């Protein structure tokens, strides 16, 4: 709280010194009025809903496809040797490089943004899952066999509990990347959403609204991370975060 108040006072002080013109560096009052304008028009709420829909759709699609693939690759050395170079290649390829193809294939709207978020999330999550599974000590599986745990029970009672702490950490990192990608995608291939609002404010030279959108983007990003942090408090994975 003190940090927030201090930052606000510093911001106000810099604007009072007139180091930059108000058109280039709006003050807290101008930004507050911009917030009121945007929320009264309902545009900000609509943009938030649009961006959250896209990032949630793309991210969840990546989670539910990367987890089984990562599990399989982690348990199969031959498959890992064959596919790991491709996974690493696409992981290092910026999702924004796909924007021209996304527009050509899917046009403008929800689908290209969801596609880009999926690409930004799928390969890092696959690699994290693969590494977590491959790093499980073999003694875990030996003990499971000694206790008669076979088949699908090994996955549910050994593999998943062992990788969950690392997987949740990967979720947090990847969700942050996905949130940044949706903003960038909407700036270049969208017709609404927070990224498009940033671009529109920039084109209209409304720096007060530009700061408004930046604040909203940052607050939502922190909120998404806090939601995922809540997963670390589950009894099944809390052991992995013990100090």
Image: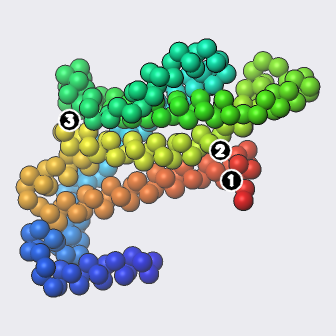
Residue on which disc 1 sits: 241
| Mark sitting earlier along the chain (1/2) | 2
Q: Secondary structure at mark 3?
A: helix
Near-viewer residue (212 or 128): 128
Disc nearest the viewer among 3 and 2? 2
Q: CA distance from mark 3 to mark 1?
A: 39 Å
Q: Is residue 46 in view?
A: no
Name the residue at 35% across, 31% down: 93
Name the residue at 78% across, 18% down: 151
Q: Are marks 1 and 2 in contact (CB under 8 Å)?
A: yes
Residue on which disc 3 sits: 189
Q: Secondary structure at mark 2?
A: helix
Residue on which disc 2 sits: 165
User: Measured along the vertical axis of the image, is residue 116 above or below residue 27?
Assistant: above
Residue 141, horizontal then vertical, whole percent = 81, 27
Q: Secondary structure at mark 1?
A: helix
């Amino acid at each position: 709280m003190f940090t927030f108040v201090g930052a606000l006072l510093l911001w106000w002080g810099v604007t009072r010194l007139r180091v930059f013109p108000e058109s280039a560096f709006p003050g807290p009052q101008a930004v507050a009025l911009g917030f009121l304008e945007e929320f009264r028009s309902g545009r900000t709420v609509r943009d938030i809903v649009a961006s959250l829909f896209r990032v949630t759709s793309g991210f969840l699609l990546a989670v539910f496809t990367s987890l089984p693939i990562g599990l399989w690759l982690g348990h199969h050395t031959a498959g890992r040797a064959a596919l790991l170079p491709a996974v690493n290649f696409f992981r290092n390829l910026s999702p924004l490089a796909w924007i021209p193809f996304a527009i050509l294939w899917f046009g403008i709207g929800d689908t290209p943004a969801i596609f880009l978020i999926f690409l930004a999330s799928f390969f890092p999550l696959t690699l994290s899952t693969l590494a977590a599974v491959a790093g499980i000590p073999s003694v875990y599986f030996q003990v499971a066999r000694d206790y008669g745990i076979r088949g699908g029970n090994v996955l549910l009672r050994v593999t998943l509990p062992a990788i969950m702490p690392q997987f949740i950490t990967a979720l947090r990192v990847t969700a942050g990347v996905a949130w940044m990608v949706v903003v960038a995608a909407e700036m270049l291939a969208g017709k609404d959403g927070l990224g498009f609002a940033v671009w529109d404010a920039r084109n209209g030279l409304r720096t007060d609204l530009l700061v408004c959108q930046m604040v909203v983007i940052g607050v939502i990003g922190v909120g998404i991370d806090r939601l995922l942090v809540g997963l670390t408090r589950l009894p099944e994975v809390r052991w992995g975060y013990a100090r």
